[in-house]
Protein backbone atom coordinates (compact mmCIF):
# COMPACT_ATOMS: atom_id res chain seq x y z
CA UNK A 1 0.00 0.00 0.00
CA UNK A 2 2.96 2.25 0.58
CA UNK A 3 4.25 2.87 -2.92
CA UNK A 4 2.81 5.32 -5.42
CA UNK A 5 1.54 3.72 -8.62
CA UNK A 6 4.22 5.39 -10.79
CA UNK A 7 7.56 3.84 -9.92
CA UNK A 8 10.60 6.08 -10.32
CA UNK A 9 14.13 4.84 -10.21
CA UNK A 10 16.26 7.42 -8.43
CA UNK A 11 19.61 5.64 -8.38
CA UNK A 12 20.91 2.94 -10.68
CA UNK A 13 22.72 -0.13 -9.37
CA UNK A 14 25.86 0.98 -11.22
CA UNK A 15 25.82 4.37 -9.49
CA UNK A 16 25.32 2.76 -6.11
CA UNK A 17 28.20 0.34 -6.67
CA UNK A 18 30.44 3.18 -7.81
CA UNK A 19 29.67 5.34 -4.76
CA UNK A 20 29.96 2.46 -2.31
CA UNK A 21 33.42 1.83 -3.71
CA UNK A 22 34.31 5.54 -3.54
CA UNK A 23 33.11 5.76 0.06
CA UNK A 24 35.14 2.74 1.08
CA UNK A 25 38.22 4.32 -0.47
CA UNK A 26 37.47 7.63 1.28
CA UNK A 27 37.03 5.98 4.65
CA UNK A 28 40.20 3.92 4.11
CA UNK A 29 42.12 7.11 3.29
CA UNK A 30 41.14 8.63 6.63
CA UNK A 31 39.79 11.81 4.99
CA UNK A 32 37.12 13.64 7.00
CA UNK A 33 33.64 13.18 5.57
CA UNK A 34 31.27 16.12 6.12
CA UNK A 35 28.61 15.15 8.60
CA UNK A 36 26.19 16.99 10.85
CA UNK A 37 26.23 14.86 13.95
CA UNK A 38 27.02 17.15 16.89
CA UNK A 39 23.71 18.91 17.29
CA UNK A 40 24.89 20.78 20.39
CA UNK A 41 26.64 23.24 18.07
CA UNK A 42 23.35 24.11 16.38
CA UNK A 43 21.10 24.84 19.33
CA UNK A 44 19.05 27.98 19.90
CA UNK A 45 19.08 30.04 23.09
CA UNK A 46 15.84 30.69 25.02
CA UNK A 47 14.92 33.92 23.20
CA UNK A 48 15.73 32.40 19.82
CA UNK A 49 13.62 29.38 20.73
CA UNK A 50 10.54 31.44 21.60
CA UNK A 51 11.06 33.64 18.56
CA UNK A 52 11.04 30.57 16.31
CA UNK A 53 7.93 29.23 18.05
CA UNK A 54 6.22 32.61 17.74
CA UNK A 55 7.12 33.23 14.12
CA UNK A 56 6.49 29.65 12.95
CA UNK A 57 3.37 29.19 10.84
CA UNK A 58 2.02 26.13 12.57
CA UNK A 59 3.25 23.09 14.38
CA UNK A 60 3.04 19.31 14.39
CA UNK A 61 1.34 17.98 17.51
CA UNK A 62 1.89 14.33 18.39
CA UNK A 63 0.41 11.96 20.92
CA UNK A 64 0.05 8.29 21.85
CA UNK A 65 -3.10 6.51 20.72
CA UNK A 66 -4.97 4.05 22.91
CA UNK A 67 -3.20 1.08 21.24
CA UNK A 68 0.18 2.62 22.05
CA UNK A 69 0.93 3.78 18.51
CA UNK A 70 2.06 7.33 17.75
CA UNK A 71 -0.21 9.91 16.14
CA UNK A 72 0.30 13.39 14.78
CA UNK A 73 -1.45 16.34 13.18
CA UNK A 74 -0.62 19.78 11.90
CA UNK A 75 -2.10 22.51 14.10
CA UNK A 76 -2.18 26.29 14.19
CA UNK A 77 -0.87 27.95 17.31
CA UNK A 78 -0.33 31.24 19.08
CA UNK A 79 1.96 32.30 21.90
CA UNK A 80 -0.03 34.14 24.56
CA UNK A 81 0.94 35.06 28.13
CA UNK A 82 4.17 33.12 27.81
CA UNK A 83 2.65 29.82 26.67
CA UNK A 84 1.93 28.14 23.36
CA UNK A 85 -1.77 27.45 22.67
CA UNK A 86 -2.83 25.09 19.89
CA UNK A 87 -6.15 25.05 18.10
CA UNK A 88 -7.82 21.69 17.38
CA UNK A 89 -11.08 20.87 15.65
CA UNK A 90 -13.88 18.43 16.32
CA UNK A 91 -13.13 15.00 14.85
CA UNK A 92 -9.38 15.35 15.21
CA UNK A 93 -7.85 12.11 16.48
CA UNK A 94 -5.76 14.25 18.83
CA UNK A 95 -8.70 15.18 21.03
CA UNK A 96 -9.68 11.79 22.51
CA UNK A 97 -6.06 10.67 22.57
CA UNK A 98 -4.83 13.69 24.50
CA UNK A 99 -7.83 13.67 26.86
CA UNK A 100 -6.79 10.11 27.77
CA UNK A 101 -3.02 10.70 27.87
CA UNK A 102 -1.87 14.35 27.81
CA UNK A 103 1.76 13.57 27.03
CA UNK A 104 2.69 15.34 23.82
CA UNK A 105 5.57 16.29 21.60
CA UNK A 106 5.28 19.34 19.34
CA UNK A 107 7.56 20.29 16.47
CA UNK A 108 7.59 23.97 15.53
CA UNK A 109 9.07 24.50 12.08
CA UNK A 110 10.64 27.91 11.60
CA UNK A 111 10.43 27.59 7.83
CA UNK A 112 12.75 29.05 5.21
CA UNK A 113 15.74 27.14 6.48
CA UNK A 114 15.52 28.69 9.96
CA UNK A 115 15.35 25.45 11.91
CA UNK A 116 12.98 23.70 14.25
CA UNK A 117 12.09 23.39 17.91
CA UNK A 118 10.68 20.26 19.48
CA UNK A 119 8.87 20.69 22.77
CA UNK A 120 8.18 17.61 24.85
CA UNK A 121 5.77 17.82 27.73
CA UNK A 122 2.02 17.63 28.21
CA UNK A 123 -1.04 19.52 27.06
CA UNK A 124 -3.94 20.82 29.11
CA UNK A 125 -7.35 21.44 27.54
CA UNK A 126 -8.57 24.97 28.19
CA UNK A 127 -12.30 24.86 27.65
CA UNK A 128 -13.42 28.39 28.57
CA UNK A 129 -14.91 30.74 25.96
CA UNK A 130 -12.57 33.73 26.55
CA UNK A 131 -9.52 31.55 25.88
CA UNK A 132 -11.08 30.11 22.73
CA UNK A 133 -11.87 33.63 21.47
CA UNK A 134 -8.39 34.88 22.35
CA UNK A 135 -6.63 32.01 20.59
CA UNK A 136 -8.85 32.13 17.49
CA UNK A 137 -8.21 35.90 17.18
CA UNK A 138 -4.46 35.46 17.55
CA UNK A 139 -4.21 32.48 15.19
CA UNK A 140 -6.30 34.20 12.51
CA UNK A 141 -4.21 37.36 12.66
CA UNK A 142 -0.92 35.44 12.78
CA UNK A 143 -1.95 33.80 9.56
CA UNK A 144 -2.59 37.09 7.83
CA UNK A 145 -6.38 36.94 7.52
CA UNK A 146 -8.28 40.17 6.86
CA UNK A 147 -10.24 41.62 9.79
CA UNK A 148 -13.43 40.50 8.03
CA UNK A 149 -12.11 36.92 7.89
CA UNK A 150 -10.92 37.18 11.49
CA UNK A 151 -14.44 38.16 12.59
CA UNK A 152 -15.91 35.30 10.55
CA UNK A 153 -13.59 32.81 12.26
CA UNK A 154 -14.40 34.10 15.75
CA UNK A 155 -18.12 34.13 15.01
CA UNK A 156 -17.95 30.50 13.83
CA UNK A 157 -15.88 29.20 16.76
CA UNK A 158 -17.84 27.01 19.15
CA UNK A 159 -16.79 25.46 22.45
CA UNK A 160 -17.20 21.71 22.09
CA UNK A 161 -16.37 21.92 18.39
CA UNK A 162 -13.18 23.95 18.51
CA UNK A 163 -10.67 23.06 21.20
CA UNK A 164 -7.73 24.86 22.72
CA UNK A 165 -4.84 23.10 24.41
CA UNK A 166 -2.06 24.80 26.32
CA UNK A 167 1.36 23.25 25.92
CA UNK A 168 3.20 22.73 29.19
CA UNK A 169 6.83 22.19 28.19
CA UNK A 170 9.17 19.87 30.03
CA UNK A 171 12.02 19.77 27.55
CA UNK A 172 13.11 21.73 24.47
CA UNK A 173 15.18 20.32 21.63
CA UNK A 174 16.32 23.01 19.22
CA UNK A 175 18.12 23.03 15.93
CA UNK A 176 18.92 25.76 13.44
CA UNK A 177 20.17 25.37 9.91
CA UNK A 178 21.53 28.94 10.09
CA UNK A 179 24.26 27.92 12.48
CA UNK A 180 25.35 25.15 10.15
CA UNK A 181 25.26 27.00 6.87
CA UNK A 182 25.77 30.54 8.21
CA UNK A 183 22.49 31.68 6.63
CA UNK B 1 12.48 42.21 13.16
CA UNK B 2 12.73 45.70 11.66
CA UNK B 3 13.56 47.33 14.97
CA UNK B 4 15.98 44.57 15.91
CA UNK B 5 13.77 43.31 18.74
CA UNK B 6 12.79 39.69 18.99
CA UNK B 7 9.10 38.81 18.74
CA UNK B 8 8.55 36.14 21.34
CA UNK B 9 4.79 36.34 21.85
CA UNK B 10 1.52 37.13 20.05
CA UNK B 11 0.09 39.16 22.94
CA UNK B 12 0.14 42.32 20.82
CA UNK B 13 -2.33 40.76 18.36
CA UNK B 14 -5.25 40.57 20.79
CA UNK B 15 -6.73 43.09 23.22
CA UNK B 16 -8.69 42.04 26.28
CA UNK B 17 -11.42 44.58 25.38
CA UNK B 18 -12.15 42.83 22.09
CA UNK B 19 -12.07 39.43 23.79
CA UNK B 20 -14.73 40.68 26.23
CA UNK B 21 -16.84 42.08 23.38
CA UNK B 22 -16.67 38.83 21.42
CA UNK B 23 -17.46 36.73 24.48
CA UNK B 24 -20.52 38.89 25.21
CA UNK B 25 -21.67 38.62 21.57
CA UNK B 26 -21.17 34.86 21.44
CA UNK B 27 -22.97 34.33 24.76
CA UNK B 28 -25.90 36.37 23.45
CA UNK B 29 -25.93 34.59 20.09
CA UNK B 30 -24.08 31.26 20.13
CA UNK B 31 -22.76 29.91 16.85
CA UNK B 32 -24.94 27.18 15.44
CA UNK B 33 -23.62 26.20 12.05
CA UNK B 34 -20.02 27.17 11.58
CA UNK B 35 -18.39 26.43 8.28
CA UNK B 36 -16.17 23.37 8.63
CA UNK B 37 -12.64 24.70 8.77
CA UNK B 38 -11.05 21.65 7.18
CA UNK B 39 -11.77 18.90 4.68
CA UNK B 40 -10.35 15.65 5.97
CA UNK B 41 -9.49 12.84 3.56
CA UNK B 42 -8.20 9.35 4.23
CA UNK B 43 -7.49 8.75 0.51
CA UNK B 44 -3.85 7.89 -0.06
CA UNK B 45 -3.81 9.88 -3.32
CA UNK B 46 -4.56 13.05 -1.34
CA UNK B 47 -1.64 12.32 0.97
CA UNK B 48 0.65 11.87 -2.03
CA UNK B 49 -0.54 15.19 -3.45
CA UNK B 50 0.89 16.92 -0.37
CA UNK B 51 4.02 14.75 -0.16
CA UNK B 52 4.79 15.08 -3.85
CA UNK B 53 4.17 18.78 -4.34
CA UNK B 54 7.25 20.76 -5.30
CA UNK B 55 8.60 22.19 -2.08
CA UNK B 56 11.03 25.07 -2.02
CA UNK B 57 14.59 23.98 -1.49
CA UNK B 58 15.20 26.07 1.64
CA UNK B 59 11.87 25.53 3.27
CA UNK B 60 10.44 22.11 3.02
CA UNK B 61 11.49 18.56 2.22
CA UNK B 62 10.94 18.20 5.92
CA UNK B 63 8.31 17.00 8.29
CA UNK B 64 7.81 15.78 11.82
CA UNK B 65 8.44 12.11 12.37
CA UNK B 66 6.71 10.70 15.44
CA UNK B 67 7.64 7.63 17.46
CA UNK B 68 6.93 6.16 20.88
CA UNK B 69 9.33 6.12 23.79
CA UNK B 70 10.24 3.27 26.11
CA UNK B 71 7.96 4.62 28.85
CA UNK B 72 4.95 4.61 26.51
CA UNK B 73 5.21 8.33 25.77
CA UNK B 74 5.65 10.09 22.47
CA UNK B 75 8.49 11.97 20.83
CA UNK B 76 8.93 13.74 17.53
CA UNK B 77 11.57 15.51 15.50
CA UNK B 78 11.88 17.58 12.37
CA UNK B 79 13.58 15.52 9.68
CA UNK B 80 14.23 15.82 5.97
CA UNK B 81 12.62 13.30 3.67
CA UNK B 82 12.74 12.24 0.07
CA UNK B 83 10.51 10.26 -2.26
CA UNK B 84 12.67 7.51 -3.71
CA UNK B 85 11.34 4.79 -5.98
CA UNK B 86 7.84 5.96 -5.08
CA UNK B 87 8.28 5.61 -1.34
CA UNK B 88 8.96 8.01 1.51
CA UNK B 89 12.46 7.76 2.95
CA UNK B 90 14.20 9.62 5.71
CA UNK B 91 17.33 9.08 7.74
CA UNK B 92 18.73 8.83 11.23
CA UNK B 93 22.06 7.97 12.78
CA UNK B 94 23.50 5.69 15.40
CA UNK B 95 23.45 7.27 18.85
CA UNK B 96 20.12 9.08 18.51
CA UNK B 97 17.21 8.26 20.79
CA UNK B 98 14.86 7.94 17.86
CA UNK B 99 17.07 5.32 16.22
CA UNK B 100 16.89 3.00 19.21
CA UNK B 101 13.21 3.78 19.73
CA UNK B 102 12.30 2.97 16.12
CA UNK B 103 14.35 -0.21 16.17
CA UNK B 104 12.44 -1.25 19.30
CA UNK B 105 8.96 -0.23 18.05
CA UNK B 106 8.72 0.51 14.32
CA UNK B 107 5.26 2.09 14.51
CA UNK B 108 5.53 5.70 13.37
CA UNK B 109 3.64 8.71 12.06
CA UNK B 110 4.96 11.42 9.78
CA UNK B 111 3.37 14.87 9.53
CA UNK B 112 4.14 16.64 6.24
CA UNK B 113 2.92 20.16 5.49
CA UNK B 114 2.60 21.86 2.12
CA UNK B 115 4.93 24.72 1.31
CA UNK B 116 2.18 27.31 1.82
CA UNK B 117 1.41 25.77 5.25
CA UNK B 118 -2.27 25.37 4.31
CA UNK B 119 -2.52 21.63 3.56
CA UNK B 120 -1.04 18.85 5.61
CA UNK B 121 -1.00 15.10 5.71
CA UNK B 122 -0.17 12.58 8.38
CA UNK B 123 0.98 9.21 7.14
CA UNK B 124 0.79 6.32 9.58
CA UNK B 125 2.63 3.06 9.34
CA UNK B 126 5.96 1.56 10.26
CA UNK B 127 9.58 2.22 9.54
CA UNK B 128 12.33 -0.08 8.33
CA UNK B 129 15.86 0.93 9.23
CA UNK B 130 18.88 -0.22 7.28
CA UNK B 131 22.55 0.60 7.83
CA UNK B 132 23.64 -1.61 4.96
CA UNK B 133 26.23 0.19 2.82
CA UNK B 134 24.32 -0.30 -0.40
CA UNK B 135 20.95 0.81 1.05
CA UNK B 136 22.44 3.92 2.66
CA UNK B 137 24.31 4.86 -0.52
CA UNK B 138 21.22 4.35 -2.65
CA UNK B 139 19.31 6.59 -0.23
CA UNK B 140 22.07 9.22 -0.24
CA UNK B 141 22.18 9.42 -4.03
CA UNK B 142 18.40 9.56 -4.33
CA UNK B 143 18.06 12.09 -1.53
CA UNK B 144 20.74 14.28 -3.07
CA UNK B 145 18.88 14.27 -6.36
CA UNK B 146 15.55 14.85 -4.66
CA UNK B 147 16.86 17.92 -2.86
CA UNK B 148 19.36 19.14 -5.40
CA UNK B 149 17.43 18.38 -8.54
CA UNK B 150 18.60 17.18 -11.92
CA UNK B 151 21.43 14.69 -11.74
CA UNK B 152 23.15 16.27 -8.74
CA UNK B 153 24.27 13.55 -6.36
CA UNK B 154 27.27 15.08 -4.61
CA UNK B 155 25.35 16.86 -1.80
CA UNK B 156 23.46 13.71 -0.93
CA UNK B 157 26.59 11.67 -0.65
CA UNK B 158 28.48 14.35 1.28
CA UNK B 159 25.72 15.07 3.77
CA UNK B 160 24.14 11.72 4.32
CA UNK B 161 26.47 8.91 3.43
CA UNK B 162 28.31 9.28 6.71
CA UNK B 163 29.36 6.66 9.26
CA UNK B 164 26.54 5.41 11.52
CA UNK B 165 23.89 6.50 9.02
CA UNK B 166 20.63 4.58 8.62
CA UNK B 167 18.31 4.82 5.65
CA UNK B 168 14.73 4.77 6.96
CA UNK B 169 11.93 3.54 4.71
CA UNK B 170 8.45 4.61 5.77
CA UNK B 171 5.81 2.01 4.91
CA UNK B 172 2.46 3.78 4.73
CA UNK B 173 -0.56 1.97 6.12
CA UNK B 174 -3.04 4.85 6.26
CA UNK B 175 -3.16 8.59 5.94
CA UNK B 176 -5.15 11.62 7.07
CA UNK B 177 -4.95 14.70 4.84
CA UNK B 178 -6.32 18.07 5.87
CA UNK B 179 -7.27 20.86 3.45
CA UNK B 180 -8.81 24.18 4.48
CA UNK B 181 -12.32 24.74 3.13
Image (spheres, coloured by chain):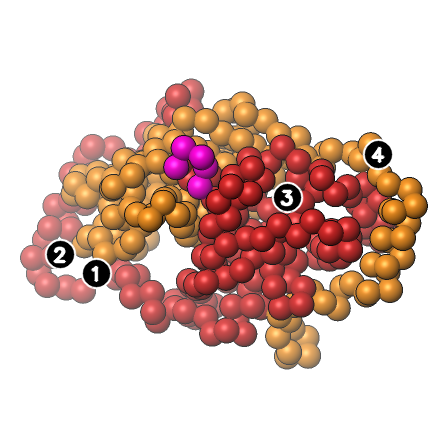
Chain colours: A red, B orange
Which image quadrant: the N terminus of chain B? bottom right
Is residue A85 on the magenta stretch? no
Marks 3 and 4 close (CB-CB < 8 Å): no
Q: In terms of secondary structure, where does tag 2 sit? A: helix
Query: CA gap, disc 4 to disc 1?
Result: 61 Å
Return the residue at label 2: A26
Q: Chain of mark 4?
A: B
Q: Are marks 2 and 3 on the same chain?
A: yes
Q: In terms of secondary structure, where does tag 1 sit? A: loop
Work out whether residue A88 or residue B140 is closer to the camera in this orientation and state it: A88
Residue B50 lies, in percent from the top left, at 54, 35
Q: Chain of mark 2?
A: A
Seen in the image, is A180 located left or right of residue A71? Answer: left
Q: Earlier in the sequence, mark 2 or mark 3?
A: 2
Return the residue at label 1: A33
Which image quadrant: the C terminus of chain B? top right
Mark 4 or 1: the one toward you:
4
Mark on residue A88?
3
Q: Are marks 3 and 4 on the same chain?
A: no
Q: Chain of mark 1?
A: A
Query: CA gap, disc 2 to disc 3?
Result: 50 Å
- Answer few, some or many: residues within 10 Å of disc 4's Cα (few below 14, many 20 plus, some between 14 and 19): few
For the stretch drawn in magenta, the main secondary structure is loop
Seen in the image, is A102 located left or right of residue A87? Answer: left
Q: Earlier in the sequence, mark 2 or mark 1?
A: 2
Q: In terms of secondary structure, where does tag 4 sit? A: loop
Q: In terms of secondary structure, where does tag 3 sit? A: strand
Residue B132 lies, in percent from the top left, at 16, 41
Magenta stretch, residue numbers: A64-68
Marks 4 and 2 close (CB-CB < 8 Å): no
Return the residue at label 4: B32
Q: Work out which residue is located at the far left of the displayed protein and give it.
A: A28
Amino acid sequence: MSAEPARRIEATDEEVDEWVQRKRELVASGEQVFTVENLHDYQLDEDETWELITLGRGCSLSWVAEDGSPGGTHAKHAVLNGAAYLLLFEGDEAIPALRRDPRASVVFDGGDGVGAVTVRGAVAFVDDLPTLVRVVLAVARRNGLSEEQVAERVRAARPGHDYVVRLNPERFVTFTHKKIFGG
Amino acid sequence: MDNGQRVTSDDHLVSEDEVERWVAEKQAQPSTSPAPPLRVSTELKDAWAVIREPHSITHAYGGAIVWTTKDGGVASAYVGFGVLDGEVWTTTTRGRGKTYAMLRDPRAAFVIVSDDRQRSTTIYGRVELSNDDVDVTRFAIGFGRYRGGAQEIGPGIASFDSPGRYAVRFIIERSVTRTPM
